[in-house]
Amino acid sequence: MIESNKGFRGPGGFAGPLICGVDESGRGPLAGPVVAAAVILSNDLDVSGIGDSKTLTPARRELLKERIVNSSTQWALGVVGPQTVDRINILQATFLAMRLAVEKLRMKPDFIMVDGKFEIPKIDIRQKAVVKGDAREMSIAAASILAKTHRDKLMIQLEKRYPGYGFSKHKGYPTKEHISNLEKMGPCPVHRKSFRPVCNFFDNKSLN
């Protein structure tokens, strides 16, 4: 899958400082990667309807994703797998995904707005953490859409590799169906061993 438009140069312009919105998808699931997106909005993007991805239907998210990626907007994705999540913990894995996304951008931002309570560590760009930023800042909302649609697509692919868990339906989140299937089948290679109740299937040594 393409994870950035680093080589794309479209007709749209960028007025003023380059503001980059960053958001993630996949902190809470029991399985699969955490995905972050970094987005610098271009002047040619129609931003009507863009909002917090959690409030949008899957069909609407896909339509908005296509509008974003087909504009001159600069975007990139960072993907960190479950093994790394287990090794460094989910918060640090989220920060890593965010750094990867920002580093893949063709244009270096002047300023970053990141969704949540925490700024991204180990990054040499001025930034601000914005609580509920995906509902307050358009660039963060666009990032939330790209991160969510990309992760959902990855989970649909993982359902084909590991059928029976329902990944294409619940996307790895701890739904009753997922927990039930996990108890029946045991974990698969993309389950996060450090997350409960997945960790109940392993002893402490197997988490290292």
Image (spheres, rainbow, N blue to C red):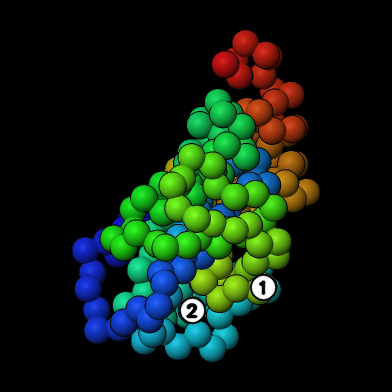
Q: Identify which residue is drawn at 30% across, 83% down.
A: 12
Dot 1 amino acid type: Ala
Q: Please, what secondary structure does the residue beneath circle 2 have?
A: helix
Q: Position of residue 108 (x, y in %)?
A: 34, 59
Q: Which of pointers 1 and 2 lies earlier in the amino acid sequence?
A: 2
Q: Amino acid at mark 2?
A: Leu
Return the residue at label 1: 135
Distance from the alpha carbon under mark 1 to that under mark 2: 15 Å
Looking at the picture, how far across and down is residue 7, in whole percent? Answer: 21, 63
- Looking at the rendered structure, which numbered label has been put on residue 64? 2
- Residue 131 lies left or right of residue 104; in this view the side is right
Disc 2: CA contacts within 10 A as few (<14), some (14-19) or many (>=20):
many
Q: Quadrant of the C terminus?
A: top right
Q: Give how far across and how far down residue 5 sits, in percent.
A: 29, 64
Residue at left offset 40%, top offset 62%: 109
Q: Residue at x 41, y 54 (%)?
A: 102
Q: Position of residue 74 (x, y in %)?
A: 35, 68
Name the residue rendered at 50%, 85% in the picture. Answer: 47
Camera-side residue of 159 and 125? 125
**Regarding mark 1 in the picture, which secondary structure is present there?**
helix
Residue 57 visible, this orientation: no
Farthest right residue in view: 176
For the residue pair 140 and 202, the one nearer the viewer reads as 140
